[in-house]
Amino acid sequence: MPHAASLIWLVAGASLLAVVTRTAVPPLAWLALTFLLHASRSMAAWHGVPYVWLAVYAALAIGNRGILPVSGPAYFAIVAFVSTTVALPFAIDRFGAPRLDGLGATLIFPMALVAAEFLRSRFSPAATWGSLAYTQYGYPPLMQVAAFAGIWGITFSVAWFASTCDWAASRGFEWSVVRTPVLACASVLGAIAIGGSVRLVLAPTDRPSLRTATLNRPVDLFGPGEMTRIAEGRLSADERSRLSAKLTRLHDWFLEGSRREARAGARLIAWPEQNLLVFQDDEPAFIERARRLAADEAVYLAIGMGTVYPGATLPFENKLVLIDPTGRIIASYLKSHAVAGWEAGIMRPGDGRVPVVTTPIGRIAAAICYDADFPEFIRQAGRSFADLLIVPANEWKEIKQIHAQMAAFRAIENGVALVRPAASGISSAVDPWGRVLGTADYFAPGDRTLTVQVPIGGIRTLYARTGDLFAWLCVAGAVLALGIAVVAPGR
């Protein structure tokens, strides 16, 4: 049986992990990882690994309530899988760290944690959901690491701090013994804090800006489940006739709202993901109305919409149509990543290419909601030197905060301003350094229109050029360190 002190550390770490799973509180994530790692290292291996897994499982089962869009046995199975990927780096560290020395003993855990997060994002439907990096939203200097190493550099930084602190504590902080690893970690973290702060201070403030507005649908137009039935394309003739009238009112709502915002000075107007639904037969006439409006008011329209093919096996096109001030369609993009479950069962996926179009105001890129949870996918915008990224979204109340925060890291990674109109969530705009320019909450009372000045002009980032190189180096480093530990004598 583990000592009571170890269990206290374990419970404390798991409790903090449950909190930061739901809400980004940067310091708590550092403490959570440090406490969990200390508990793992202070217990015998055959105790430590199962206990850490159970603690992480309990934390994620509590923290992800309402966040994961499943329930029942499927919910607990998903939590078990994610818990295993989180606990695995602790197991690797528990085996490898005692067999390594000095700096190597402190690096095996952060490399293993990055490797686990990264490989999970590449080979599971969860994408980057659950990455420790997202808990650091709200600490802008550290967030800037994403421009160089992606979110993986942020995860590494937090995990290295935890590993170094516990390693030094286990040696009584005897300076002659712990000096090199402690100085190495402190120097890198200090450079990140200072460098990130300098990067923010030196960010230009004289760039041209674009007045932008995001709209949202009226809350009382459709009854419960009606928009879902329309999207699924399985409607009787009577239902289609009745709901077509509501869709006409919805179309008028968005076009009239766009005209209003254009006359108030907006030059770009963006609509949320699948907030506007249209039957395929009615789409040409609706698009023609939108084109005339854009030309009449000399505005860019970024239309998040869903085109429905009634009776088809895959009846739903989740798309973004971008119209320029001359009324010309300059991009029509189909969402590439369907959310597993309901959406994947009805959606026609796109071709996996992020459109980047050149306009008089700069290069505009587009993606839709879940697409933005895949950093390597959105990196196409950075590689193509985009100046502005438009990401219509549609979510639910429990994830509104964290999902909007996750998107801000894509702006930093690729050096682009981001406009994110969200249905049933938080519409937001951020600059290329991840700083929030404005938000509008769908669930808040009053007008849910967001109006904001968005700076135009991308910046070049290392991540846009090298992608997930740092993450792959961590995978290789973790394998190498584990191999060395296997052949090294036990300590």
Image (spheres, grey):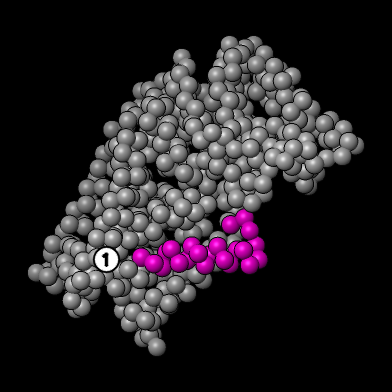
* Mark 1 residue crowding within 10 angstroms, few (<14) / some (14–19) / many (20+): many
Q: Does dot 1 land on a helix, a strand or a loop?
A: helix
What residue appears at the point 26 percent right and 39 percent down from the top-left corner? Answer: 198
Q: Quadrant of the N terminus?
A: bottom left
Give amino acid for label 1: Leu
Toward the viewer: 267 or 117? 117
The residue singled out by tag 1 in the image is 482
Q: Is residue 114 left or right of residue 236?
A: left
In the rendered view, tell whether residue 282 sits above or below residue 120: above
Residue 309 position (above or below residue 132):
above
Q: Is residue 252 or residue 350 the one in the foreground? A: 350
Residue 105 seen: no
In the rendered image of this protein, does residue 460 appear above or below residue 343? Answer: above
Q: Position of residue 366 (x, y in %)?
A: 51, 30
In the rendered image, the residue lying farthest to the right is: 238
Residue 10's image quarter?
bottom left
Residue at point 68% right, 20% down? Answer: 287
Give the quadrant of the C terminus.
bottom left
* Picture layout, residue 412 above or below residue 79: above
The answer to whether residue 80 is visible is yes
Picture quadrant where residue 149 is located: top left
293 vs 95, left or right, is: right
- State the predominant SS element of the stretch in magenta: helix
How far across and how far down the image is residue 324, in percent? 56, 17
Q: Is residue 9 magenta?
A: no
Q: Which residues are magenta?
A: 68-89
Rendered location of residue 439, percent (x, y): 54, 38
Residue shown at 52% from the left, 47% from the top: 403
